[in-house]
Image (spheres, helix red, strand yellow):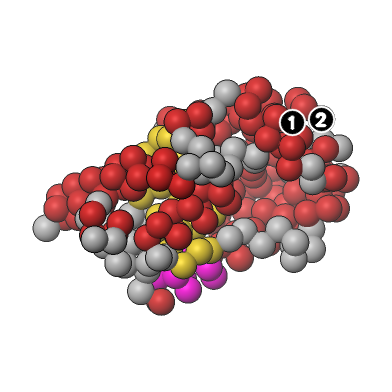
Amino acid sequence: MNLRNRYNIPNDAVITIAGTVGVGKSTMTNAIANALDFRTSFEKVESNPYLDKFYADFKRWSFHLQIYFLAERFKEQKKIFEYGGGFIQDRSIYEDTGIFAKMHFEKGTMTKVDYETYTNLFEAMVMTPYFPHPDVLIYLEGSLDDILKRIKYRGRPMEQQTPIQYWEEMYGRYENWINNFNACPVIRVNINDYDLLTNQESIEPVLERIGQSIEQTRMSKK
């Protein structure tokens, strides 16, 4: 029996992985996709024309970066559902407005006019009954120390040059965001509860929870 059938996960399911920078979203995305034989949808970091500029000057480039992410994620979400599902998605469209744009506005690195323009666009595109939401969002969480170690180990130059205070700020905002998130069902998974690099089978308790969540949600809609 394959793992999709074992854990009653539909072939057309769409599962989104969320969490702060360095928490292991890409690793989890690949692990679930491999286990279920699903396709993956990754954030396009290398092709982003604003990312390096943004890390060098938050105030100058924050609005441009958020608009770019919103457009790319909207197109990707549309493509996933047009394809018929069966996808694991690395990072959600909801984090952009609930965490990043809001943080830059409140910290003074995005103007009020830019923030209002961005949030109005987000609400018109995403917060409507026509926008296809995922079946479940997997929220990866862990201690701040663990996440900072992962960022350091990953070694991306633009992240290494970013002050620790920025990661601390983002960590707290992610916790506040997920505590109030209700666009789709959420499964919270602690990064210390599995080790996908040395034990692929440690993904199975996560798959079991995914199957249970999707089954409950779809049953309630019948």
Identify the residue at horizontal 53%, vertical 68% (top origin): 76
Question: Which quadrant holds the C terminus?
Answer: bottom left
- Label at residue 166: 1
Q: Is residue 67 left or right of residue 2?
A: right
Q: Residue type at mark 1?
A: Tyr
Prevailing SS of the magenta stretch: helix
Q: Is residue 153 visible?
A: yes
Q: Are marks 2 and 1 in contact (CB under 8 Å)?
A: yes
Q: Residue type at mark 2?
A: Pro
41 relative to 186, above or below: below
Report which quarter residue 22 is drawn in. top right
206 relative to 219, above or below: above
Q: CA distance from mark 2 to mark 1?
A: 6 Å
Q: Position of residue 218 (x, y in %)?
A: 20, 55
Q: Name, please, the residue furthest toward the left.
A: 222
Identify the residue at horizontal 66%, vertical 62% (top origin): 44
